[in-house]
Structures are given as structure tokens and as C-alpha cells.
Amino acid sequence: MKTKFLLFALLAAFCVPAFAQRSDKNAMPVLTDGLAYSLPRTGLRIHVQAEREKFFAGPYAQFAEAMLGLKNAPTTDHEKWLITGVRIETFGEADPNQIYKTAGLNGSLINLTDDGVLAAINTAVETRTVAPAVATFADDSSIPAYPFPDLSLNPFFEKPDSASANVLIAKSLQQKAQEAAHTITKLRKRRFKALANAYDEQLPDGKAYAVMVKELDQLEDDYVALFIGKSYKNSFEYSFDYIPGDNSVSGDVVFRFSETKGVLPKTDLSGKPVQIELKKLDELASAQAKQKGATAGVSHIFYRMPGKAELRLMNGVNLLAMARLDIAQFGTVLPVPDELLDGNHTVVFHSTSGAIKNVGAK
């Protein structure tokens, strides 16, 4: 009987502390086997702004000089693209070549991002998820199917008479162009009379007068476009991600560009390659820092000291963009000093370069 009571007492003694420990939901878990984490690598996000101009030749282009005195009016449709701007930003992601494991109790101190990158020590920080770059190459539908809906104020058929047995006879292209040119002349005369107040009747005042003159201008522009053509311009933006390696690069293709097709993916060989040049700077300083910190500390918690780089984006021999950037891969990896891992300090790291952002007291 005494033996059974003794066994019950021993079981109760072991279960009570275990139950008390499980009931404390706010207790910090103690990691004695370490925790895996990654250092960030720096990526480049290249935003390209481009403008497309679609030109449609006027249906009466061949008569522009003879009827309106406008020389060299284009007679064929064409499309032209132009790069109007480039913007470069950096972002961070987990570096698959820089994965470590904390030693002992240090794993309880670190704070990680969603993809396992070291973000802070002994403090919580808000991490921002970077959306992936999306380059959409689909054409838009802002261009009308037929850009010249109004070709004339007059009918396109001759007035039938008894001799033609009421058969409609279509006017020639030259006749249509001549009528359109005559309409332009009439519009210009009416606009001149309105501006010079040459009408016998009193013209409307204020806003009504301004609207009338504006509408006359628009009508003239629409009819002149029948001879000189019409252009439609649209702006587009594309984004491309580029992840540098550990060394300088030269000649890597980011995307391609064609003056007739626009911005293209790098796999489309119909465009001219736009290449990136990334020159590693301060290599001597980086090597010295690596040598000094190589044997410091036994924490197994590391951070990055990024290196400087000079970036050039080239479209053939033309320079599109140039910048100086901090690249994590071009720097060195150093251990966090053991003095900062005593639980009394906080350390926050830059998300794109892995460098120490600030150190504070807990």
C-alpha cells in the first residue's frame, strides 16, 4: 500500500511542473539546437517607361500638297517606340549561398522575415513583402479600329438623274479629297469671321463663344488629318528583376528593345539587347574587413557588410541609366559581436543589404 502511495506522489511531483510550464503561453521557448536562417542578397528591379506612337496615313495624303499646300505628307502607316525613362530600385531576398545555423541559445533571440532572412536580434520588426515584378507585353485596345470616321460633309455618290436611271455613281477619291479641302477652307473662313467679329449678327459671349471657336478648331484639325494623317500616343511601363552574382558583370541582357516593336523580353531576338554593366568597387576595403572579422566571435550569427557597385544600363552604345548602389553580394560576411547577444541589446538589419541598421539597449 505504501509502495502505491509513493509512486502516486512521485508522478504528481513530475506532472505539476510540466502542467505549469505548458499553461504559460507567453513563455519564450529555449532553442538549444540552434535555428537555421539566411542572409539577404540584393536584387535590382529595373522599371522602364516607353512611349508608343502609332501613325495612320490620311486617306487623301496623295492630294495634300496639290490641294492644301502641305508637302511631304506620309502615305504609309507606321509604329514608333521610344524609351522615355528608366528607374532602378533594390530589394532583398534570401541568399541560397548564405545559410547558417545559430549556436545554442542564440536561436531564441533572432527575428526572421517570411522567407527566413535575418531581420533583427532580441526585438521584433515589421517586414515588408516585396511583390514580384510583372512585365506585361500584351497590346492595349485604346487605338480605334478606324481612325478616320468622318471623311466628308458631302455624300460620296453623285446625285442620280433621269438619264442614269437613278443608279448611284460613286465619287472618285480625288473628288472626295477636293470636297474635304473645300470644307477646310470654309471652316477657316468661319473661324476668322468669328474671331474678327465680322458677322452682322451678335455673337454669343463668354463660355459659349469659347466653345464655338474650340469646336471650329477641332473640326479643322479632323479634316486636315485626312491629308496629313493622325497619331496616337500611349505610355507603358515594364519591370524586370536582375540578381547579381558575387563578381562584376558586363554584357548581361536584361531585356530587348525595338523601335518598331517596343520593349521585348530578352528571349525575343527581334529586338536589340539592353545590357547591364555592374562594376564592383572598394574591393580592397572589403577584403581588409573580411580579414579582420574572419575569426571574431563564436555566436554563429552573421551579418553582411555590403560593397559598392557602379551600374550602367546600355542600349548598344547609348547610356540609358547610371547609378551607384550597395550590393550585399559584393561585400563580406562578418559575425555579430558576442557582446550584443547577452539579451540586453537589440540589433536591426537592413532588409536589402543585410548590414546593421541600428543597435540599441533592451
Image: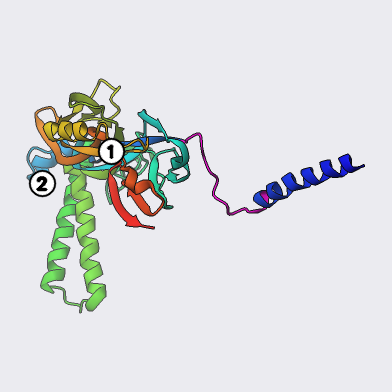
Q: Which residues are magenta?
A: 22-35
Confirm whether residue 204 shows in the render: no
**As rendered, which of 9 and 165 lies closer to the eye?**
9
Confirm whether residue 336 shows in the render: yes
Q: Quadrant of the N terminus?
A: top right
Answer with the quarter of the image where residue 132 lies.
top left
Q: Are marks 1 and 2 in contact (CB under 8 Å)?
A: no
**As rendered, which of 216 and 101 lies closer to the eye?**
101
The residue tagged 1 is 304
- Give the label on residue 68, or none: 2
**As rendered, which of 44 and 70 lies closer to the eye?**
44
Tag in front: 1 or 2: 1
Answer with the quarter of the image where residue 52 lies.
top left
Decide: is 334 above or below 202: above
**In this view, which residue lies farthest toward the front?**
2
Q: Percent from the top left, x then y, of residue 112? A: 43, 43
Q: Which amino acid type is marked by label 1?
A: Arg
**In this view, which residue lies farthest toward the right?**
1
Residue at image location 31% in from the left, 46% down from the top: 350
| Label 1 Cα crowd, 10 Å radius (few <14 / some 14-19 / many 20+) | many
Residue at image location 26% in from the left, 73% down from the top: 208
Structure colour scheme? rainbow
Q: Which secondary structure class fits the magenta region best?
A: loop
* SS at badge 2: helix
Q: Check residue 31 for magenta coloring.
A: yes
| 180 relative to 337 in the view: left or right | left
Sequence-wise first label, 1 or 2 = 2
Q: Check residue 154 for magenta coloring.
A: no
Q: Which amino acid type is marked by label 2?
A: Leu
